[in-house]
Amino acid sequence: MHRFEHRVVAYIKEHRLVVPGDKLLIACSGGVDSMALLSFFQQFQQYFQIEIAVAHVDHMLRGETSAQDRAFVEAYCHEHGIPVNSCAIPIAAIHEQEGGNSQAICRRERYQFFEQLMRAHTFTKLVTAHHADDQLESMLMALTKASSLNGLKGILPIRSFGKYFVIRPFLMVTKAEVGEYLHNRALTFREDASNAKDDYTRNRFRHHIVPLLKHE
């Protein structure tokens, strides 16, 4: 077992994130983190005695590029015999009608789709690829808001999600380790160009504040 895999398996067991018989719905954008997550559970599906399937949402914010992300995830799943459920949601049109924060709308619509799938196909848990870097960013962002101490709890390894649960098996590994794991498995992924922009608060923390703290 690869060291990365050993650490993730140990974390899953420590927090009882997965039990035999679980039906996991893996949220997969096609990016580095979610493709590594999907690859991990492909490898350990028999080990954990679980079933897996994939959910992908095209937010239709990057035109043909985001449509290609959807096609990439669907093609990978079809090639490997993994059930896949995908949809396209016109976030820009919803944002124009409602106003507000576009990222919040993306999250709301995405999770509504996930919940519909879980109800329709009796999945037990939703799985996301949040890692240690996401945890650090979230806690720093919570500090700047100074609204309450609850934000300092950070991202939990497991939390309730309606009648279901969402789990984060990668919380103890860094983004660099996730990328190295995917590289070692010689798997491809899709790069979201919007991740390089400073339009969103999380990206500004990711690009400027976190690197400085790591350097110090």
Image: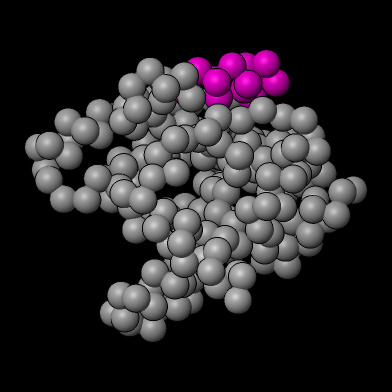
* The magenta stretch spans residue 189: no
Image-quadrant location for residue 204: bottom left
Q: Position of residue 65 (x, y in %)?
A: 42, 22
Which residue is most to the left? 97
Residue lying at 30% horizontally and 75% vertically, measured from the top left: 145
* The magenta stretch spans residue 74: yes
Image-quadrant location for residue 74: top right
Q: From this view, report whether residue 202 is shown above or below residue 106.
A: below
Residue lying at 38% horizontally and 83% vertically, measured from the top left: 149
Image-quadrant location for residue 26: top right
Locate the C terminus and report the quarter of the image it occupies. bottom right
Q: From this view, report whether residue 164 is shown above or below residue 92.
A: below
User: Which of these two is toward me, 141 or 215?
Assistant: 215
Q: Position of residue 12 (x, y in %)?
A: 71, 59
Horizontally, is 215 left or right of 195 in the view?
A: right
Q: Where is residue 24 in the image (x, y as percent from the top left)?
A: 59, 42
Q: From this view, report whether residue 160 is shown above or below residue 47.
A: below
Horizontally, is 159 left or right of 42 in the view?
A: left
User: Which of these two is toward me, 199 or 82?
Assistant: 199
Residue range (magenta)? 70-82
Residue lying at 66% horizontally and 28% vertically, measured from the top left: 188
- How has the structure been colored for display? one colour
Asked whether the viewer can see residue 45, the reply is no
Which residue is most to the right? 1
Residue lying at 12% horizontally and 45% vertically, measured from the top left: 99
Horizontally, is 112 left or right of 24 in the view?
A: left
Prevailing secondary structure class for the magenta stretch in the rendered image: helix
Asked whether the viewer can see residue 32, the reply is yes
